[in-house]
Amino acid sequence: MQRLWAETALLPSGWASNVRVDIAVSGRIEDVQVGADPCGMQVPMLLPAPVNVHSHGFQRAMAGLTEHRGPDAKDSFWTWRHLMFRFMDRLTPDHIQAITAMVQMEMLEAGYATNVEFHYVHHQPGGVPYDNIAELSERVAAAADQTGIGLCLLPVHYEFGGCDQRDLTAGQIRFGNSMTQFMDLHQATTKAIAELPADTGIGVAPHSLRAVGPSDLAQYASLFPTGPIHMHLAEQQAEVDEVKHHWGQRPVAWALDNLDIDARWCLIHCTQMTPDETRALASSGAVAGLCPITESSLGDGIFDGVSWLGHGGAMAIGSDSNIRISLCEELRQLDYSQRLRDGTRAALATSQHSTARRLFSAMLQGGAQAAARQTGRIETGYWADLMTLNTQSHHLWTLTGDKALDAWVFAGDDRLVKDVWSAGRHMVSDGRHVARSAIITAYKHTLEALKDAL
Ligand code: ZN
């Protein structure tokens, strides 16, 4: 058993002082006592550590390779996607494992306890499946075994190259599976994660309305009766136009009319919604999986957080392309995008809670829902997904409670994250992952092998 004692901690009831937290060997919180005498490992400020709700690990190694202008008149999400396909075609299973481990380590060091991996590279270059259809799922699982992050693995179903159900392009054939093949893959992936700790989870992810046919999409909730369902939705204007052209409705309107969208669903991005769609989707109970840094990097558009939260929508944060993995920067970028659009300040704050407090609380709750993980609360029975902030940093001097959270999000950076536990596994100590040097060495070798890929 581990015993922590925090000068201050964010509990479900709010900030509390002198908090003792006992963590059972199972990785769950066994007891929480307020007003306790100092004991065990003493930490200054203890918070629940959130879920990172959306990631494509391998894209981390593309950072810095896509910022030049291509031959097209205008660089865009679609030209970037072309480069991503080319890059991905060079990746071996060893590369994918090493890059994923790096991503998971950076997530932990940023304060995330869980990686929801939207995993869509399944086959060999050329599209032939590996002898073990779940070879690359096993590599993601092996990375999680090394890094100690909580894993929720989402094998991705990707069948078509567009809404007209055209064949996949050469760049996409490593992703491709029919519905039947995908069911086999899902079963093999379930076996691949069986050796991981008990907090590991699995869900499913139809990639998007472009990549899966409408009749298959309509069956998802019944074919997979348990676990989360994640899908990219309404990210780019060209995608909206394509769905409208072939299926007769905008993506969100079509999804609401044809899929059983409820609290099991997490829709990623939703940066292209009308006000009516925002209101209706928020009311469905689904989580909006937002990735503000990647959405900025790819020019996706601005999610309407003011209206979404105003209608009681659930939200969570992911790092998607992983060009930059930073929990506090994602929250900052989300609020700044609203301010720039609306000419306001503290756009997502309320009269009760400051900006960072409201966003942090929302992402704890939405992340837990989207990962189907009992997390996000320092409470008996929950997984011990915890983080500490370094209150000795000059960024936090004289500040407590919500003001300290605001200073971390708007003035600080990841260096304020001191310790992180995932289901009781103490993986980050004094700001550094416990296996940092081995993970960095493998990542360096991978980058050397890929340096001429683009
Ligand atoms: Zn994505």
Image: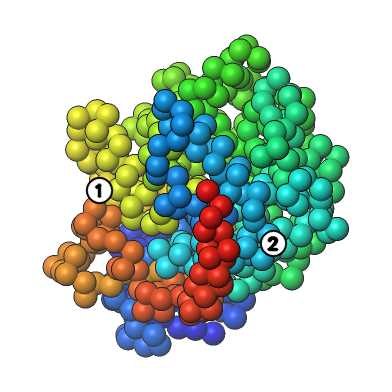
Q: Is mark 2 within 8 Å of ligand 1?
A: no
Quickly name the residue at label 2.
93
**Which residue is drawn at the image coordinates 21% and 57% (left, top)?**
411
- The residue lying at 52 percent from left, 58 percent from top is 451
Give the quadrant of the N terminus: bottom right
Q: Compared with residue 236, is residue 451 higher up or lower down, i.e. above or below?
A: below
Judge whether residue 268 can be spotted in this image: no
Image location (x, y in percent) of residue 317: 45, 48
User: What amino acid type should be assigned to the residue bearing mark 1?
Assistant: Ser
Question: Is label 2 in a helix, a strand or a loop?
Answer: helix
Give the answer, above or below, for where 88 lies relative to 275: below
Q: Quadrant of residue 159?
A: top right
Most extreme residue toward the left, as rendered? Answer: 398
Residue 2 spot, x, y in % from top left: 49, 83
On residue 179, which mark appears? none
Q: Position of residue 434 (x, y in %)?
A: 48, 80
| Above or below, 256 relative to 183 | above
Seen from the viewer's position, the closer of residues 176 and 222 is: 176
What's the distance in space between the residues labelled 2 and 1, CA to CA?
A: 44 Å
Q: Secondary structure at mark 1?
A: loop
The residue tagged 1 is 354
**Res 410 visible:** yes
